[in-house]
Image (tube, grey):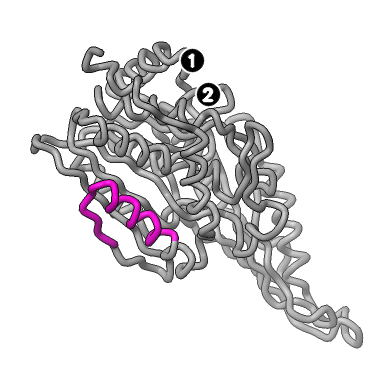
Amino acid sequence: MTPDTAALDLPFDSDRMLDGLRTWIETESPTFDAAAVNRMMGVAARDLALAGASVETIPGRMNLGDCVRAKFDHPSKEKGILVLGHMDTVHPMGTINGQLHFRREGNKAFGPGIQDMKGGNYIALEAVKQLRAAGIQTSRPVTFLFTSDEEIGSPATRDLIEAEAARHAVVLVPEPARPDGGVVTGRYAIARFNMRSTGRPSHAGARLAEGRSAIKEMCRQILAIEDMTTEACTFSVGVLQGGTWVNCVTTHCDAEALSMAKRQEDLDAAVEKMLALRATGNDVSFEVKRGVTRPVWEPNEGVMQLHGKAQALAERLGFNVPSQSAGGGSDGNFTGAMGIPTLDGLGVRGALAHTLEEHIFVDSLAERGKLFAGLLQVV
């Protein structure tokens, strides 16, 4: 075995890996349940420690969960490799006991967060474990950073991510593989918005005409916002909350919108449009506040060199990892936009993330694990 292919011959076993991953999947960790996220971080911290890492827990902020940073010993003192992943999911507590319970059906395994992105995090750790067991040195020092709020745009961890990435030469992000098995070398820009409409309350049965419904105003705004979607930039509203009593004309209604664009200038224009929105009538008010923004990440020479190494390794393993820019932001947006060579989408193959049919293809655990191990040896 030559040094650059030694990792490709390690004994990864998808069935055994799935058995280990099951504990991670059954430890539910929805973003807004800090205690649940912290339980998951505790499981990951223990596994990292057992693998030989020096582990520290970084307290959460904004009522969100903690983060875990783990460093593996290395003889070199040069800038290292940062493995960047998140442990929060979009699935609420109890999902594991319902339709999305952990199960295997042929080559598919189902469970909350199994594709996005606990499966990818797990194969990254397995890659390090396999290398260390075989006595194969990684090309650089390796640090893992598992964060707690990526699914809501990383409002509490962006500064931590950027500070940690600045201390590293390369960032590897085991977010899910693309549908064709490819990896991500750039991501679109994303902006979030918090909106509130305010009406005038009244009794919906006795004095309906005296009221002005905040829900009605918000619905008008939602239709207008989503109609602004073009090929250059999309607009969508994914959260809507208003009202307490059906017999009361609603005073306040809150919603959250998201805009995504391939180019930063298109997103900047979208932000201007959203912030310029006004109420549709004099008897109601409407306010838009800018939320978390992910900058556009465009591939540079360093990113494409990383991809070239990944493609060469994949070919030796018998598959391809075509490169592409992708929507659906990740924390790779931040590190890529900083100019740090970043390769994203290195995680498992699967489908239907963020739904009750979220699953992975079991054979991709070993396949992508070998790829990740190879990258840790050559980047």
Estimate the x, y position of residue 325 in percent, counting from the top left. Answer: 48, 27
Q: In which quarter of the image is the N terminus?
A: top left
| Residue at which label 2 appears | 181
Confirm or deny contact between disc 2 and disc 1 (CB under 8 A).
yes
Magenta segment, prevailing SS (helix, strand or loop): helix
Q: Mark 1 points at which residue?
A: 319
Q: Is residue 45 magenta-colored?
A: yes
Answer whether residue 90 is visible to the viewer in this image. yes
**Figure check: 321 above or below 72:** above
Does 342 sit left or right of 256 as displayed? left
Judged left or right of residue 48, residue 194 is right
Residue 275 seen in the current view: no
Q: Position of residue 32 (x, y in %)?
A: 51, 65
Residue at x 35%, y 52% (from the top left corner): 47
Q: In which quadrant will I find the C terminus?
A: top left
Q: In this view, does 265 lie above or below 321?
A: below
Q: Check disc 1 and give the amino acid type.
A: Phe
